[in-house]
Image (spheres, helix red, strand yellow):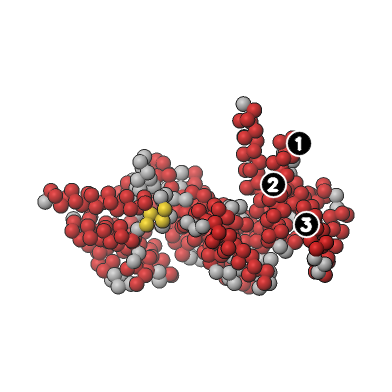
Amino acid sequence: MEDQAKNQFQELIEEIFREEASRVLASLIGSFKKFELAEDVLQEAFLAALERWPLEGIPARPGAWLYTTARRKALDRLRRSSVLDRKQALLVTLAQVEQELESTPDALVEKEFEDFPDERLKLIFTCCHPALNQEAQVALTLHTLGGLTTEEIASAFLLSPTTMAQRLVRAKRKIREAGIPYAVPALDSLMERLDGVMAVLYLIFNAGYTATTGETLVRHELCAEAIRLGRVLVELLAKAGLRESPELLGLVALMLLHDARRSARQGEQGEMLILEEQDRTRWKRSQIAEGEALLERALAHRIPGPYQIQAAISALHCQAARAEDTDWFQIAMLYSELVRLTRSPVVRLNWAIAVAMATTPGRGLELLAALESDPNLQNYYLFHSARADLLRRSAQWEKARQSYHRALELSHNAVERAYLERRLAEIAAHQNLE
């Protein structure tokens, strides 16, 4: 029982750390302007908490305790560095920090941390600066704001820890050498930069919601992190007194509505279930309600955008008690507007599917035929899978079999491949009966 209680206490400390780490880290980076130093001393503070909190109890303000402890460890490191490196800039930093720390009692530092504006908004925009490539933005965002280890991020994107570590090092070096400011951009460029931040969150969510490779269909930790970071961004913009972004609300709504269906996407044996096969009683109604409320807030601004439209499509799916109750006509209309806004071939693919469901599979196949020459779709397995599905619904078994085979050749996810093989077996059974 003693070991069990000890493990539970350690799990509680780790949960607190996950909740507080990103704000503490953002404040440390704001104070010292050094990513590596901030990350190292925060880790040391966490280790100190694991040693001291079981004996002394969890402090009333754990985030402030971690910040104060990490801040003092940073001072110790700067002192040791000054012995070996007498560079003027370092001595100036040391003198400033030492004077501030020595003249400020710990209790006051903790109170200042609690009262000081949240620095995470600066950290989000720093991690997603357009000077960094998108892969670096994603990795750095997950590492600093999501609190994921290098190994966890590498595993999620099926990369080696060494490769991911190199990406993180290069991203931090770029921030340092390019003099990327640790700040929220000016209002006149904020919305432009916000688009990039939202794109990173959307990419993280999609990487988790439909894993393109590997043995699992969904990487839950990435979906959860994207949603959490989206909520944080909405909250931080409001606290900073900045105007509400309807597209950001739409993005968070979209992620919530998709994620609400997550547990129903696989059957008891782990097999993939498409939307019409899912047990809708397993959908998370509280999460759907939250997503719908955010969508209503976004639409009230009357400034439609791609994320809001996608969220509206997802909401229509969630509102249908049965697959056959789905308002495919409305969904097809929304997709047509999305095509107009994005010109994306993948969106055109989804529009063709929606039209097929609203009218006939034949009409959908006509629209897909117009996309066959698009180089972006020729090696996209979902294009061939969608075409196969419409051919199957039209009882064109041989053509459906060929398209499913092509999709199978292009798919690298074990769960999706099993789904395609199931469809091929069904088609073979139909052909044997003829």
Residue appearing at x 31%, y 50% in the figure: 419
Residue appearing at x 72%, y 53% in the figure: 41
Q: Tag 3's secondary structure?
A: helix
Nearer to the camera, 145 or 321: 145
Q: CA distance from mark 2 to mark 1?
A: 15 Å
Q: Nearer the viewer, mark 1 or mark 3?
A: 3
Residue matched to label 1: 56
Q: Residue furthest top?
A: 1
Residue appearing at x 41%, y 41% in the figure: 282
Callout 2: 10 Å neighbours few (<14), some, many (20+)? many
Q: Nearer the viewer, mark 2 or mark 3?
A: 3
The quarter holding residue 58 reads top right
Nearer to the camera, 281 or 289: 281
x, y percentage for residue 252? 52, 56
Callout 3: 10 Å neighbours few (<14), some, many (20+)? some
Q: Is residue 116 toward the left or the right of residue 180 in the image? A: right
Do labels 2 and 3 touch, CB within 8 Å?
no
Q: Residue type at mark 1: give it.
A: Glu
Residue matched to label 2: 46
Callout 1: 10 Å neighbours few (<14), some, many (20+)? few
Q: Is residue 96 toward the left or the right of residue 430 in the image? A: right
Residue matched to label 3: 77
Q: CA distance from mark 2 to mark 3?
A: 16 Å
Q: Is residue 60 toward the left or the right of residue 429 in the image? A: right
Residue appearing at x 62%, y 61% in the figure: 124
Q: Which of the marked residues, 2 or 1, is nearer the chain's N terminus?
A: 2
Q: CA distance from mark 1 to mark 3?
A: 26 Å
Q: Which of the marked residues, 1 or 3, is nearer the chain's N terminus?
A: 1
x, y percentage for residue 218? 44, 50
Q: Tag 2's secondary structure?
A: helix
